[in-house]
């Protein structure tokens, strides 16, 4: 049985199921791009496979409405995704489930953030280059289509940021900006930031900004979280607070 990528989150293996459709070319290519798509429907991983049993199409990965990942095609092979021979040769394609249908084609936030994270992993582990505006692209880069839809066009900059952050955290895993949060005595939420850098003897803290604030926070049980996770949590909180009907 063909194995999935060695990702750090679970990957459902639907490679054999897709292979049975015949809608894949088992030819390996040098991958340079990740191409983002949307399902055009509120589909499960198995629902996507059902569509591809009928339609002569495929993609390497799908992220469902819960943010979970499935793989259908080996990352280095030629999936039938982009409506372009060049696009299919150069791309690893990621499909995403929709939350709403036309005209907005909303994609759940957990879905597009996880797709961007997967893209960053693929750039680090398969492609071997940091993602850029030229190499992390949406389907319409390759052929005449609106895919991945207007909503994803609006999220593109954040997706690129998450993909680049993920790539950086894999390639330079010991460097991370940390943020400390605490309630100050005047009732305002104030923040201090420090940087953790690797050294021969382990981690060395280098403080940036207001040392008095850092010392105050340390003495008052400040919450310390990686800033990237903090930003993602903030995004998720906003999404939870204003669900789309
Ligand atoms: Zn597409």
Image (tube, rainbow, N blue to C red):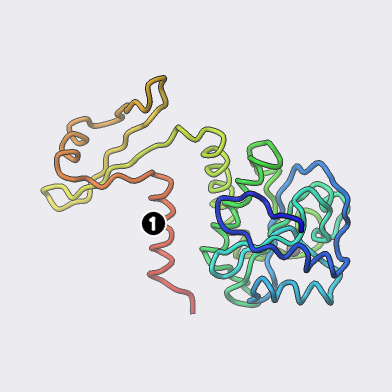
* Residue at x-position 84% and y-position 74%: 55
Q: Quadrant of residue 155?
A: bottom right
Cβ at disc 1 under 8 Å from ligand 1: no
Q: Is residue 201 left or right of residue 122?
A: left
Of 132 and 199, which appears nearest the observer?
199
Q: Up-down: is 214 above or below 4?
A: above
* Secondary structure category for the residue under label 1: helix
Spot occupied by residue 145 in the image (x, y as percentages of width and height): 78, 64
Q: Is residue 99 left or right of residue 149?
A: left
Residue density around tag 1, few if under 14, some if 14–19, many if 20 or more, within 10 Å: few
Q: Up-down: is 109 above or below 40?
A: above
Q: Quadrant of residue 47?
A: bottom right
Q: Quadrant of residue 241?
A: bottom left
Spot occupied by residue 16 in the image (x, y as percentages of width and height): 78, 64
Spot occupied by residue 125 in the image (x, y as percentages of width and height): 66, 41
* Residue at x-position 70% and y-position 60%: 71
Q: Is residue 26 left or right of residue 135?
A: right
Circle 1 is placed at which residue position?
234
Of 197 and 192, which appears nearest the observer?
197
Q: Up-down: is 51 above or below 7?
A: below
Q: Is residue 229 left or right of residue 87?
A: left
Among all residues in the image, which is located at the extreme top? 200
Spot occupied by residue 33 in the image (x, y as percentages of width and height): 73, 46
Among all residues in the image, which is located at the extreme bottom? 245
Quadrant of ligand 1: it is: bottom right
């Amino acid at each position: 049985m063909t194995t999935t990528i060695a990702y750090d989150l679970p990957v459902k293996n639907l490679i054999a199921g897709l292979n049975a459709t015949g809608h894949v070319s088992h030819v390996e290519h040098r991958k340079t791009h990740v191409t983002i798509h949307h399902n055009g429907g509120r589909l499960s991983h198995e629902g996507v496979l059902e569509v591809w049993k009928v339609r002569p199409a495929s993609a390497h990965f799908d992220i469902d409405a819960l943010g979970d990942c499935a793989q259908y095609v080996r990352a280095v092979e030629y999936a039938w995704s982009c409506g372009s021979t060049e696009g299919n040769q150069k791309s690893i394609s990621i499909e995403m489930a929709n939350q709403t249908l036309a005209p907005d084609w909303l994609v759940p936030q957990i879905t597009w953030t996880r797709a961007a994270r997967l893209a960053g992993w693929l750039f680090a582990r398969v492609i071997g280059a940091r993602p850029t505006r030229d190499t992390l692209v949406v389907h319409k880069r390759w052929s005449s289509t609106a895919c991945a839809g207007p909503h994803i066009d609006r999220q593109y900059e954040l997706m690129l940021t998450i993909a680049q952050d993920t790539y950086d955290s894999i390639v330079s895993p010991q460097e991370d900006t940390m943020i400390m949060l605490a309630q100050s005595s005047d009732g305002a939420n104030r923040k201090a930031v420090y940087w953790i850098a690797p050294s021969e003897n382990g981690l060395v803290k280098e403080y940036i900004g207001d040392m008095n604030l850092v010392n105050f926070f340390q003495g008052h049980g400040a919450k310390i979280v990686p800033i990237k996770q903090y930003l993602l949590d903030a995004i998720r909180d906003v999404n939870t607070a204003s669900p789309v009907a």
